[in-house]
């Protein structure tokens, strides 16, 4: 396969490991743990994997002998930069422990385990993918491992290949599934360990034990580079307002991190919108006010950062979506809207909504009304991620500015341009931070397996320090669980970490945003630096530095 110059150079990069994972390794165990909430319910659901201690890996005085073991790995959910390095870290540590160990990758996600589709991962394969982006080594998928029939089908192939441990690399839902699978196999005495690794560019898989999910650093640096480029262009042409939507449906971590890196004129944080009970009109009024103020200073240009999931955090629209999901799932709705035009479906919906929700729907542009009424996912729910929020807001801001101009309170020019940065960041070549972090997570997963652990997630902490000072170990997944209502039933899940309005990253942003709105304070981060001084190449996100007080 032909490789670019960067690919060839990155293949030679050797990720840095924490001191505790170099050479001989021993395990330091903490006290028994309990779940973050709903302790009685979680303990009852996970009697075999509840209450396990935290684990830390530290240098040992003498090397151990390891028996050979066969291990499987699954990439689950959306892509995130660094996934290949997790796999490389597992492989290298397994082979270091015992060269006779074998490593298998299940193809296209959890479905590969259920359907018995796999490949043996060898050194030749590994060397093709060191420090590369993407999940194309074995592919990924979104099949949920929830049913006993799936567990049993997976167990068949695990036994056939003599696999004694399985690593699931994924987000909060995937790691919850890993915990359920670990409990199932432990209860059966199947002899299969299950280990998780924290992945998601959205940054919403973090807590006291997980400092950050892998891929967040690289994705934000990728987006920040392009935002910086746009801001430089805006400051050069001085005639466009750029509305930029960023990935992050459930949380606004990406938008906040990019704001901290680039200092745009406006950045919306969904969690603040919900906490303050803001309406869409409130958001539009705020943006229009910034546009008008800058215009009064001769600046008819700017940048606006918008989280992908903003719509779902606007309380009135959240209520509208909930009623739409219920209404359009009824047999009456299916019969009444089948074969009808978009306009006819919208009119039928309006006639059957509660008055407040109907008013909310009517306040939206016609195109968005159709998206809400017509675009459904396989479960019958509104596909919020398909709504072009950046265009919705700019259109509404344009209308507001037109009214302000008629009233004599605005005299500028407003020319909006639109962008959505999502897939561009999910498979970027990992930054040095993510390359190192992911490799250490893989090595930690292999050490958890070697020490007989199951139902754990590999973790690496203290990552604002140089890599040698990072602390590697494992956390029982049950420690992170609570009970939440999902699909009409209470289920154990890892709680998503939303932006904390009392947290240091948001406070730092909030303290500066009025200045950024009024003045042109743009920062241009440039591309990810893979080579050069450590202070340029190995830095973590602004979010992590602020959270850790560094």
Image (cartoon, grey):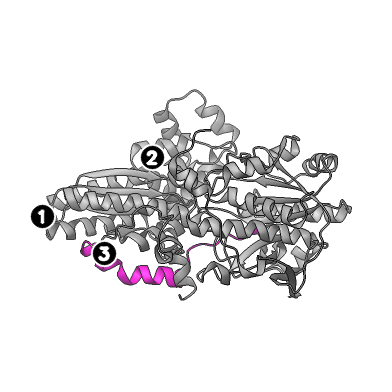
Percent x, y of residue 60: 73, 72
Location of mark 2 (residue): 368
Location of mark 3 (residue): 516
Q: What element carries label 3?
A: helix
Residue 16 is left or right of residue 517, and the answer is right
Q: Distance between the residues labelled 2 and 1?
A: 30 Å
Location of mark 1 (residue): 408
Residue 209 is left or right of residue 218, and the answer is right
Please report whichever mark, 2 or 1, sits nearer to the chain's N-terminal start.
2
Q: Which residue is drawn at 59% across and 69% down?
A: 461
Cβ atoms at labels 2 and 1 below 8 Å apart: no
Please report whichever mark, 1 or 3, sits nearer to the chain's N-terminal start.
1
Which quadrant: the C terminus?
bottom left
Residue range in magenta is 494-520
Q: Is residue 498 magenta?
A: yes
Percent x, y of residue 120: 72, 39
């Amino acid at each position: 396969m032909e490789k670019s110059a960067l690919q060839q150079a990155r293949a030679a990069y050797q990720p840095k490991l924490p001191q505790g994972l170099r050479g001989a390794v021993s395990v330091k165990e903490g006290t028994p743990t309990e779940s973050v909430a709903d302790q009685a319910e979680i303990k009852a659901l996970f009697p075999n994997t509840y209450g396990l201690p935290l684990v830390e890996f530290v240098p040992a005085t003498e090397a151990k002998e390891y028996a050979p073991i066969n291990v499987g790995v699954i990439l689950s959910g959306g892509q995130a930069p660094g996934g290949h390095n997790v796999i490389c870290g597992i492989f290298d540590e397994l082979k270091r422990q015992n060269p006779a160990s074998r490593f298998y990758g299940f193809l296209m996600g959890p479905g590969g385990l259920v359907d018995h589709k796999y490949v043996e991962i060898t050194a030749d394969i590994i060397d093709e993918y060191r420090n590369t982006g993407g999940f194309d080594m074995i592919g990924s998928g979104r099949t949920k491992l929830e049913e006993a029939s799936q567990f049993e089908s997976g167990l068949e192939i695990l036994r056939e290949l003599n696999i004694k441990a399985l690593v699931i690399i994924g987000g909060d839902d995937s790691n919850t599934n890993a915990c359920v699978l670990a409990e199932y196999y432990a209860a059966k005495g199947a002899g299969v360990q299950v280990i998780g690794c924290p992945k998601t560019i959205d940054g919403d898989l973090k807590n006291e034990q997980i400092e950050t999910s892998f891929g967040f650093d690289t994705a934000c640096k990728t987006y920040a580079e392009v935002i910086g480029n746009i801001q430089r262009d805006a400051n050069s042409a001085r005639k466009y307002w750029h509305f930029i939507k960023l990935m992050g449906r459930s949380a606004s971590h990406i938008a906040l991190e990019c704001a901290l890196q680039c200092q745009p004129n406006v950045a919306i944080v969904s969690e603040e919108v919900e906490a303050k009970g803001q309406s869409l009109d409130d958001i539009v009024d705020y943006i229009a006010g910034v546009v008008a103020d800058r215009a009064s200073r001769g600046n008819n240009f700017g940048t606006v950062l918008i989280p992908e999931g903003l719509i779902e955090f606007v309380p009135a629209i959240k209520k509208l979506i909930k009623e739409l999901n219920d209404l359009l799932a009824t047999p009456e709705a299916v019969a009444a809207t089948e074969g009808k035009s978009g306009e006819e479906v919208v009119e039928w919906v309006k006639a059957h909504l509660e008055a407040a929700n109907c008013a909310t729907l009517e306040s939206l542009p016609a195109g968005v009304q159709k998206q809400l009424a017509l675009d459904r996912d396989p479960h019958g729910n509104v596909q919020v991620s398909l709504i072009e929020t950046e265009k919705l807001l700019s259109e509404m801001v344009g209308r507001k500015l037109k009214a302000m101009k008629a009233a004599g309170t605005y005299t500028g020019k407003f020319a909006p341009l639109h962008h959505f940065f999502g897939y561009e960041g999910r498979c970027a070549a990992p930054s040095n931070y993510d390359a190192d972090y992911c490799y250490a997570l893989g090595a930690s997963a292999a050490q958890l397996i070697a020490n007989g652990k199951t139902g754990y997630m590999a973790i690496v902490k203290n990552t604002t320090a140089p890599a040698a000072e990072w602390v590697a170990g494992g956390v029982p997944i049950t420690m992170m669980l609570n009970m939440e209502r999902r699909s009409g039933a209470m289920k154990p899940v890892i709680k998503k970490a939303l932006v904390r309005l009392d947290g240091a990253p948001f406070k730092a942003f909030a303290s500066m945003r009025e200045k950024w709105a009024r003045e042109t304070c743009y920062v241009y981060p440039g591309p990810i630096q893979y080579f050069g001084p450590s202070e340029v190449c190995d830095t973590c996100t602004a979010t992590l530095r602020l959270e850790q007080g560094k």
